[in-house]
Image (tube, helix red, strand yellow):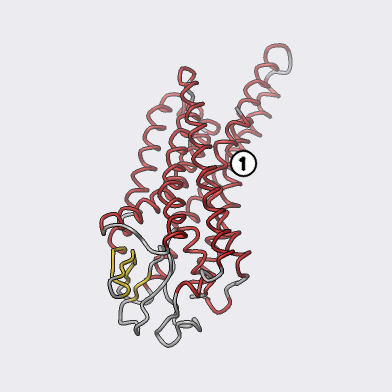
């Protein structure tokens, strides 16, 4: 596993990918949520690893300060943005819309990311070790991934709702309320269930004499590869595929809907009504599209490098502090959604 990837995992997920200095037994112990030791890595080719601080640049005080500053800024911005939107949604509660309901839960998911993914990472930048009990260790690692899943699948739920509103308006009209609450509950339940492996993979372990840290354990060396692939597919690839399909169907549905209405009525109230409905649809679709676009731009580099480094560590990109700092910006996805909504509202 490359030093850069260790830094990426440490930066985004909130842990340090250090390993025991002793030869690695049949199981592999690591402290990162998605990354596993690769035997091909020149730093660990003989079964031993140098100190994690040397590998990921903790000796460079300036780099560590930059990472802490970026993480602190992301945490403050994500917290302020989502709390601000929650306040705005509360003020508009009497004019409640289906989109606002999804955004409410998206805000909650992004706050989970801020407090249980970004904030623990910021703490790790300061202490370099996990401070807490075994139950706290497992809970934090669990909630870190819950936030990632919930944020992704809440965007999916909102987009699927838009798909039904545009492409199946009659079904959406009669079953809209039930379907919305069902999809929101499903998004949270899937997030909680898919994050469950974190509770069993991570535990508080003695990494040195009288030194404890929150590490993950895989029974086989290839377990980490499988896990990182699973996380990438379930958190990013599958949601992205659903989002792309729904967005294409929405665009096609709006196009044919506008074309049909333009042919049916071309004067007076008919034209005005057609324009009004189309503008309302287009406004919501534009907002959803921008949210999807920002989500893809923020997370795709991180997951691409994750897979690349897991399956081909020798050829994975390594660009030092600049590259790692860019990877830190993936957390900005939790900061942008509120402002996108406020711009289109």
Query: Is 205 situated above or below 122?
Result: below
Q: Position of residue 305 (x, y in %)?
A: 55, 66
Secondary element at tag 1: helix
In the image, what residue occupies the spot 47% across and 54% down?
238
Q: Position of residue 279 (x, y in %)?
A: 65, 26
233 or 124, which is in the foreground? 124
Q: As drawn, which residue projects farthest toward the top?
A: 268
Task: Report crowding for label 1: few under 14, some 14 to 19, many 20 or more residues within 10 A (C-alpha).
Answer: some
Q: As drawn, which residue projects farthest toward the bottom?
A: 46
Query: Is 74 situated above or below 165?
Result: below
Query: Is 136 situated above or below 101?
Result: below
Where's the C terminus, which quadrant?
top right
In the image, what residue occupies the spot 33% across and 44% down?
189
How many marks the image carries: the answer is 1
Asked whether the viewer can see residue 232, the reply is no
246 or 93, which is in the foreground? 93
Left or right side of 269 for 93: left
Reading the image, the residue beneath label 1 is: 290
Q: Position of residue 101 (x, y in %)?
A: 45, 30
In the image, what residue occupies the spot 46% across and 17% down?
94
Quarter of image, res 182: top left
Left or right side of 300 for 204: left
Q: As drawn, which residue projects farthest toward the front?
A: 61
Q: Position of residue 133 (x, y in %)?
A: 27, 58
333 or 117, which is in the foreground? 117
Asked whether the viewer can see residue 182, the reply is yes
Quarter of image, res 199: bottom left
């Amino acid at each position: 596993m490359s030093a850069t990837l260790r830094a990426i995992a440490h930066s985004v997920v909130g842990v340090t990918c250090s390993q025991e200095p002793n030869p690695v037994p049949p199981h592999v112990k690591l402290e990162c949520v998605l990354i596993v030791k690769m035997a091909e890595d020149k730093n660990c080719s003989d079964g031993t690893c140098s100190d994690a601080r040397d590998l990921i640049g903790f000796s460079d005080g300036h780099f560590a300060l930059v990472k802490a500053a970026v993480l602190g800024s992301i945490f403050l911005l994500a917290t302020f943005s989502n709390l601000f939107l929650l306040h705005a949604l509360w003020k508009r509660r009497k004019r409640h819309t289906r989109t606002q309901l999804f955004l409410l839960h998206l805000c909650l998911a992004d706050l989970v990311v801020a407090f249980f993914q970004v904030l623990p990472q910021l703490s790790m930048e300061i202490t370099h070790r996990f401070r807490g009990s075994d139950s706290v260790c497992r809970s934090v690692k669990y909630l870190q991934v819950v936030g990632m899943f919930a944020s992704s699948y809440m965007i999916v739920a909102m987009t699927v709702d838009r798909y039904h509103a545009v492409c199946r308006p009659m079904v959406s009209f009669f079953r809209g309320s039930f379907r919305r609450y069902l999809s929101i509950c499903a998004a949270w339940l899937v997030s909680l269930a898919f994050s469950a492996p974190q509770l069993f993979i991570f535990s508080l372990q003695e990494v040195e004499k009288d030194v404890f840290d929150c590490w993950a354990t895989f029974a086989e060396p290839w377990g980490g590869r499988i896990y990182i692939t699973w996380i990438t597919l379930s958190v990013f690839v599958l949601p992205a595929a659903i989002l792309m399909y729904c967005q294409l169907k929405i665009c096609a549905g709006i196009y044919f809907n506008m074309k049909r209405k333009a042919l049916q009525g071309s004067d007076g109230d008919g034209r005005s009504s057609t324009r009004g409905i189309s503008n309302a649809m287009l406004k919501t679709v534009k907002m959803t599209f921008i949210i999807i676009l920002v989500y893809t731009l923020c997370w795709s580099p991180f997951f691409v490098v994750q897979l690349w480094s897991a399956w081909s560590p020798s050829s994975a990109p390594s660009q030092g502090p600049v590259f790692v700092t860019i990877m830190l910006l993936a957390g900005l996805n939790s900061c942008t959604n509120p402002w996108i909504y406020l711009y289109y509202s």
